[in-house]
Amino acid sequence: MEKINGMIFCLSSRKKCLKKSLESLYENYNNKFDYPVYIYYFDDIYDDQDYVNDIKNTINNKINFYKIDYGIPCFLEKKDLFYKRSNNYARNFGVQRTGYLHMINFFVNSYYYPGTHLKNYDFCFHFDDETLWTKKIEKDFFKILQEEKKIISSFNTYHYPPEAASSRTRNTTENLYEFCVDYIKKYNISKKNTKYFKAFESKNNFYKNYFLITDSQIYNNNYFKSEEWKSWITEINRSGGIYKYRWGDHELNGLFWAIHYDEEYLSINDNKNRFSVTSNNDLGINLTELRKIQRFAPGVKNNNKKLSDKECEYLFH
């Protein structure tokens, strides 16, 4: 059978975690499937050639490291950024976590992000650098998409139950419900017959069971080429919601699906128990152990760096 043209990628800054994560990925998955792995990073954290050579020599020489640029979008000012908002979570967020906003922006825009390689492949999935793979995975994630005839899946999906719509949740989704309702009207999107679409019936529903969250997505890259996706990320980027309100990439992916797809979402941790992703789970991914080594990702070196008008062009389609 012809090999799938797929790739695996990660945006990394937890240098103490990355090697252990990659070792576990290859031992439990990628030694078998042999997909190229791309590690993207900001600033100079992986400019250390000895570190890179060690990973290539001891794990796999198809692991590639690429520095990518970052910056506050040209149409936003420092006063617009999330940490300037008045809610408690924003005040505690602080300027030192501007890099976290750049991370969200990267994942939302990864297919079109300057310096990435997703356009060279038909499929991709990403993982976080604190992911520890703990069990052998015998099934190719990309083949699951092919067999199920789906364009996207994820290692984990979940919904906020009413009691989980905490102040933090609300503080990081400010104006997101209103954005979605306006987007649906602007693009004349028809109502879907799924439980997910009920999120847009009222703000109360938005924070109940129908707010679909997806974690660590697996993509057929036709997803990113669709006019719907281009419209969605253009409107997201134009709103400045990632930088102003800290809208998360997992939430935005889930909401895009809920708005545009009139079918059930394929979760790899579904009730068939095919896989699941929580700490020490059936799939065998632990999301907490490596955080004991390095809990927080370091911030970017220049919290004030802005993109030029030319550099912002990738945000609009």
Image (cartoon, rainbow, N blue to C red):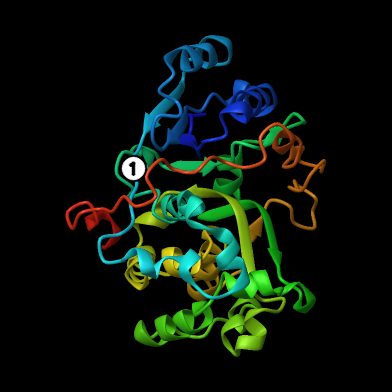
Q: What percent of the width, then of the height, locates residue 131?
A: 66, 37
Q: What percent of the width, then of the height, locates residue 191?
A: 51, 85
Q: Which residue is mark 1?
A: 119
Count of numbered circles in the view: 1
Q: What percent of the width, then of the height, locates residue 205?
A: 66, 84
Residue located 50% across and 49% down the image: 219
Q: What percent of the width, then of the height, locates residue 116?
A: 35, 39
Quadrant in which residue 285 is drawn:
top right
Q: Nearer the viewer, residue 283 or 302?
A: 302
Residue located 53% across and 40% down the image: 298
The crowd level at tag 1 (other Cα within 10 Å; few <14, some 14-19, many 20+) is some
Q: Is residue 78 left or right of residue 253?
A: left
Whether residue 239 is situated above or below residue 34 in the rendered picture: below
Give the amino acid at mark 1.
Lys
Q: Is residue 267 left or right of residue 105?
A: right
The single residue placed furthest to the top in the displayed view is 57
Q: Nearer the viewer, residue 144 or 213?
A: 213
Residue 189 visible from this viewpoint: no
The single residue placed furthest to the bottom in the displayed view is 202
Residue 75 visible from this viewpoint: yes
Q: Quadrant of the C terminus?
A: bottom left
Residue located 71% across and 73% down the image: 166
Whether residue 69 is situated above or below residue 251 in the rendered picture: above
Whether residue 116 is situated above or below residue 162 in the rendered picture: above
The single residue placed furthest to the left in the displayed view is 310
Residue located 62% across and 71% down the image: 88
Secondary structure of residue under mark 1: helix
Whether residue 136 is situated above or below residue 90 in the rendered picture: above
Q: Is residue 103 left or right of residue 282?
A: left
